[in-house]
C-alpha cells in the first residue's frame, strides 16, 4: 500500500464505509457519505438501505447524485414519501440505524455547530443551518461524523449547538433520554476519535503515517489518546478502484485533499 | 386565519389562467408565500413572475430557500425568510440570503427540517401545534421563541411543539393537472401537499394540463384535489434550473453558475435583467436557454409497470 497515493477525501470515505454493517438503514447525505454507503454496498454490506431526507427509501443511484434530491435517487428506489413521513415514520419512530453528520465546528463532546459563527442575532458567518441534522443526531441509532482534522473545526465548545452530541457529558445525554446513541465515531484525515465513558472524544486510531502529535496539534481541546491506540487498515486497491472507477469517476467529491 | 371556503361557483369551473394573471390576482405585497418543492419541482417560473411584477415585503417560507428565494431576495421582493436549510444544494452557501442576513438587512426565522415541516403539517391539518420528540440540542429552541415545550399528558414527559404555518399563498408545481386543479406528482413529493392544504390560496403550475379522465385513471397519484386550488397555470419547464421527474433533469451547472453570479450585486442585476426582466414568460425563457441546454436536460424514458384498479 505504501506506493499507492490517495486523497484525504478517499481516506475519509473508505474508513466511513468500513463503519457500516450489512443491513444498516442509513440516512445519507450527498458527497462523501453517499460515496461511503455506495462503497459499502458494493463490498461488505450489499443489503445496506440508503434513505435520503428528501423522502427516498432504498435508493440505488445509477449516477453520482449531485444534490440531496437528485432524480437519480428516485428512479429505481424502493419507496418515496413526503418529508414529514421520512422524519416522522422513519427517523423519529426509530427506523434509522446510521446517520452521517457534518458541520463547521465539532466540540469535545461531539456537539455540532452548523448554524452560525459569532452571535446568533448578529452573525459573523451565517452557515446553512440544521437541515435534518438536529433530529438525525438525536434519533439515529448511531451517528458518524466525517471532517478534515483542523483546529478551527474542533473547538473546546461550539458557538451554537445545532445538534446534540453528548451535550456536557454522557450523563447529560442519557438524562435527555434521546433514543439514539449519539456520535460514535469522528473520522478525520488523521485518524478516528470516539467517545470515552464520559462522552469525550478521544483519539482511538491513527491512519497509517499520521502521528499523535499531529492529531493533538489540530484539535482545540487537550485531546486524550486511547491506551490501546490502533492504526486503521491501509486502503485497499479494491476499495480505491470502486470509488474511482465506478462511484465518482469525475472526482467531483474525491478530489478533496489532493 | 381560517382557510376560506371557495365560492361555490368556482368549484366546478376551469381555473386555467396565465401565471402572470394568477400572481397578479392572488399574491399581494406583504403576503407569506410558500413556493414548495424539496429540490424537485421548484416553481422558478413563478418566482420570476413575482420579481417581474415587483411584489414587495413578502415573507418567503421554504425548508430550503434554494436559488428561487436567493433570486427573489436579490430582487428586493422579501422582508423576511423562514427556512430550515439555507444552502445552495450540492454547491455550498446561498450567498445572497446569507449576505443580507449577515448585513442585518433581512429578517429570518429558522427551524430544523422536521420542525419546519411539522409547522406545515399543523397548518395543513388544522391543528393548533405539532408535537415532536425532544432533540436536546437546545440552541435553536432558545433562538426561536416559536419553539415551546409542553408536558405530554399521558407520560408526563416533555415534547417540543411548533405552531402551524399557514401561508397566504402556496405555489405548487406538478407534472400534470386537470383544468380544475386536480394535481398529480411523482418523484420526490417533499412538502407540496402540506403546503397546499396549509395555505389560504393555492396557485398550481403544471407541466401538462390533462383531461380529468387521465387523473381518474390513477387516483392514488393525486396529491392535491382541485377544490383547494385557486388557479391552474400551464407552465412547461416551470421548474428549471430545478427539475421535473421524468420530464427534464436538474441543471446542476446553473446551480454552480449561480454560485459565481451571486458573488456580486452587479452580476445578479445583469442576470435578472437578462433572464427575468428580459423575457415575457417561461416559454420565452426556455426558448432563450437554447438547444444545447434542452438537449443536456433531456431524460430517457423509464415508465412504471402498469397497475390495474379494476372495474367495479
Image: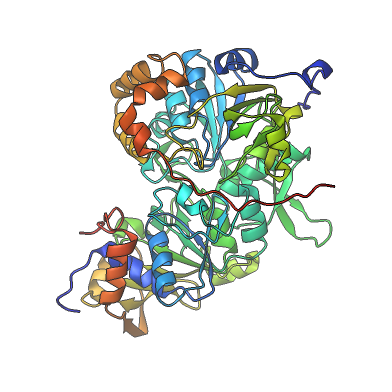
Which of B150/A42 is in front? Answer: A42
Residue A119 position (above or below residue B266): below
Q: Residue at x 63, y 48 (%)?
A: A82
Q: Quadrant of the N terminus of chain B?
A: top right
Residue A169 in the image: x percent, y percent?
A: 52, 68
Q: Is residue A40 left or right of residue B265?
A: right
Which of A55/A88 is in front? Answer: A55
Which of B303/A76 is in front? Answer: B303
Residue B87 in the image: x percent, y percent?
A: 43, 41
Which of A50/A232 is in front? Answer: A50
Q: Is residue A207 left or right of residue B58?
A: left
In which image quadrant can residue A173 be found?
Answer: bottom right
Residue B52 in the image: x percent, y percent?
A: 47, 14
Residue A63 in the image: x percent, y percent?
A: 39, 55
What residue occupies the far front of the structure in this picture? B311
Q: Residue at x 54, y 74 (%)?
A: A23
Residue A110 position (above or below residue A46): above
Q: Is residue A59 visible?
A: yes
Residue A208 position (above or below residue A125): below
Residue B236 position (above or below residue B309): above
Q: Residue at x 75, y 60 (%)?
A: B157
Amino acid at each position: 500500500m505504501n506506493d499507492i497515493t490517495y486523497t484525504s477525501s478517499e481516506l475519509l470515505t473508505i474508513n466511513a464505509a468500513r463503519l457500516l454493517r450489512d443491513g444498516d438503514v442509513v440516512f445519507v447525505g450527498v458527497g462523501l457519505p453517499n460515496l461511503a454507503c455506495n462503497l459499502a454496498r458494493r463490498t461488505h454490506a450489499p443489503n445496506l438501505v440508503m434513505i435520503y431526507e428528501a423522502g427516498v427509501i432504498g435508493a440505488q443511484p445509477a449516477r453520482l447524485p449531485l444534490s440531496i434530491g437528485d432524480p437519480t435517487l428516485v428512479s429505481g428506489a424502493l419507496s418515496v414519501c413526503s418529508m414529514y413521513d421520512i422524519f416522522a415514520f422513519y427517523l423519529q419512530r426509530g427506523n434509522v440505524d446510521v446517520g452521517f453528520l457534518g458541520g463547521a465546528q465539532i466540540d469535545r463532546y461531539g456537539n455540532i455547530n452548523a448554524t452560525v459563527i459569532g452571535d446568533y442575532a448578529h452573525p459573523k458567518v451565517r452557515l446553512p443551518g440544521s437541515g435534518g441534522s438536529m433530529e438525525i443526531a438525536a434519533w439515529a441509532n448511531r451517528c458518524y461524523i466525517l471532517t478534515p482534522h483542523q483546529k478551527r473545526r474542533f473547538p473546546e465548545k461550539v458557538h451554537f449547538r445545532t445538534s446534540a452530541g453528548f451535550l456536557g457529558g454522557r450523563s447529560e445525554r442519557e438524562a435527555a433520554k434521546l433514543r439514539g446513541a449519539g456520535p460514535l465515531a469522528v473520522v478525520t484525515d488523521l485518524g478516528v476519535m470516539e467517545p470515552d465513558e464520559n462522552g469525550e472524544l478521544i483519539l482511538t486510531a491513527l491512519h497509517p503515517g499520521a502521528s499523535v502529535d499531529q492529531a493533538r496539534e489540530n484539535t482545540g481541546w487537550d485531546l486524550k489518546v486511547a491506551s490501546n491506540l490502533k492504526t486503521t487498515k491501509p486502503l485497499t486497491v479494491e476499495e480505491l478502484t470502486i470509488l474511482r472507477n465506478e462511484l465518482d469517476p469525475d472526482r467531483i467529491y474525491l478530489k478533496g485533499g489532493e | 386565519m381560517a382557510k376560506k371556503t371557495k365560492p361555490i361557483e368556482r368549484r366546478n369551473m376551469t381555473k386555467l389562467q396565465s401565471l402572470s394573471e394568477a400572481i397578479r390576482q392572488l399574491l399581494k405585497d406583504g403576503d407569506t408565500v410558500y413556493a414548495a418543492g424539496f429540490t424537485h419541482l421548484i416553481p422558478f417560473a413563478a418566482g420570476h413572475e413575482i420579481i417581474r411584477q415587483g411584489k414587495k415585503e413578502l415573507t418567503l417560507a421554504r425548508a430550503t430557500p434554494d436559488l428561487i428565494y436567493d433570486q427573489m431576495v436579490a430582487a428586493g421582493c422579501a422582508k423576511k425568510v423562514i427556512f430550515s436549510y439555507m444552502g445552495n444544494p450540492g454547491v455550498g452557501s446561498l450567498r445572497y440570503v446569507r449576505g443580507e442576513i449577515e448585513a442585518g438587512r433581512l429578517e429570518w426565522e429558522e427551524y430544523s427540517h422536521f420542525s419546519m415541516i411539522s409547522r406545515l403539517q399543523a397548518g395543513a391539518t388544522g391543528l393548533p401545534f405539532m408535537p415532536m420528540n425532544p432533540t436536546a440540542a437546545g440552541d435553536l429552541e432558545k433562538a426561536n421563541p416559536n419553539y415551546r415545550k409542553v408536558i405530554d399528558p399521558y407520560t408526563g414527559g416533555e415534547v417540543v411543539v411548533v405552531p402551524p404555518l399557514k401561508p397566504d399563498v402556496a405555489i405548487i408545481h406538478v407534472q400534470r393537472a386537470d383544468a380544475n386543479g386536480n394535481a398529480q406528482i411523482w418523484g420526490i413529493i417533499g412538502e407540496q401537499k402540506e403546503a397546499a392544504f396549509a395555505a389560504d390560496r393555492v396557485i398550481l403550475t403544471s407541466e401538462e394540463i390533462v383531461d380529468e379522465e387521465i387523473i381518474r385513471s390513477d387516483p392514488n397519484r393525486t396529491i392535491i384535489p382541485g377544490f383547494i386550488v385557486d388557479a391552474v397555470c400551464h407552465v412547461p419547464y416551470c421548474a428549471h434550473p430545478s427539475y421535473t421527474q421524468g420530464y427534464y433533469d436538474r441543471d446542476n451547472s446553473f446551480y454552480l453558475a449561480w454560485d459565481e453570479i451571486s458573488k456580486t450585486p452587479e452580476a445578479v442585476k445583469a442576470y435578472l435583467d437578462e433572464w427575468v426582466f428580459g423575457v415575457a414568460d417561461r416559454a420565452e425563457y426556455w426558448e432563450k436557454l437554447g438547444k444545447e441546454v434542452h438537449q443536456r436536460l433531456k431524460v430517457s424514458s423509464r415508465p412504471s409497470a402498469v397497475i390495474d384498479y379494476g372495474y367495479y
